[in-house]
Image (spheres, helix red, strand yellow):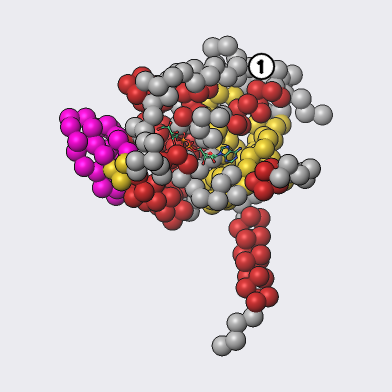
Amino acid sequence: MKLKDEKITKAIIERYAKKFVDNLNQDVIIAGAGPAGLTTAYHLAKEGFKVSVFERKLSIGGGMWGGGMMFNEIVVGDDGKKMLDEFGINTEKYDDGYYTADSVEAISTICSKTVKAGVKVFNCISVEDVMVDKNGVCGVAINWSSVEIANLHVDPLSVRSKFVVEATGHPLEVLHILEKKIDGGLFTKTGKIMGEKSMNAEIGERTVVENTKEIFNNVYVVGMAANAAFGTNRMGPIFGGMLLSGKKLADILIDKLGKDNLDSKNIEGMIKVE
Ligand code: 48F
């Protein structure tokens, strides 16, 4: 059979366009495809919810590939091990309460299981803003990462969702945008981003799960972004907290989506919608 180059092009464009158009109105949109965002997405998709993940980079998986300082092993505690077991990832006991896993096996398995669970992953796309209505955030504005990197003046497109998840890790990109554009009012002690504190694995692993919650109407923080938002410590290359945070958020959102959600708080005046 003779291969036609233009047919290959047409197949790619048509299939991508269909995937995009079929996913313009989601239950949950996740900004950032690190271990926390992917774990959230995986558990939501397993329950049948429509989930998209937008990731700036070509490859998904965030900061898990490199283990600690590019030694490609990760550490998890007892609860984290259970999360890796659920994904079918091999672990090896190092000491009581310490397990290691090959970081490449761990994150490639999470990526694969997430996509196979039905999550639509759009790589090479950055979330550059949120979309708002009188009830709060109702989606995101997105653009090609290449547009962003080249600093081109090109308007974004928007995608709607019931909930938006801030999973961009240390830089908290979505929340910084939100903080700038609303008149205060994040659900933190100060109403503002509190900022990440220095390394402490013991505290960071505990608080990352505690801090996984709603931070603005219809916006939830997960993973490292949760600690950076609520002002607690980073934890370094121990990754159980990321997965437990993702699972906790999926459970919260499954509950909300199951209840037909949107018991929105009164935030009129905070968001400017003409
Ligand atoms: O940084 P990242 O892995 O976040 P995480 O899932 O996990 C944190 C750990 O990797 C580690 C740690 C704990 O052990 O401290 O750092 O919380 O993944 C975040 C992803 O978000 C992407 C970024 O490229 C990365 O893959 N990202 C960041 N900003 C944007 C974005 C954006 N504006 N739009 C789309 N993707």
- Specify the farthest residue to the right: 274
- Give residue 36's quadrant in the image: top left
In the image, what residue type sits under mark 1?
Gly
Residue 183 point in image, percent of width and height? 70, 17
Identified at 76% across, 44% down, the residue is 152
Q: Is residue 166 visible?
A: yes
**The N terminus lies in which quarter of the figure?**
bottom right
Q: Is residue 168 above or below residue 188?
A: below
- Residue 86 sits above or below residue 240 on the image: below
Q: Nearer the viewer, residue 194 or 134?
A: 194
Q: Is residue 23 left or right of residue 62?
A: right
Which residue is located at x 66 percent, y 66 percent?
14
Q: Residue 134 falls in which quadrant of the image?
A: top right
* Residue that carries the numbered disc 1 in the rendered image: 184
271 left or right, relative to 123: right
Does residue 84 show up magenta in the picture?
yes
Up the image or down, 156 lies above or below 267; here it is below
Q: Position of residue 143 (x, y in %)?
A: 68, 45
Image quarter of the C terminus: top right
Q: Residue furthest top?
A: 190
Does residue 86 show up? no
User: Residue 154, position in %: x, y?
Assistant: 77, 45
Magenta span: 74-100
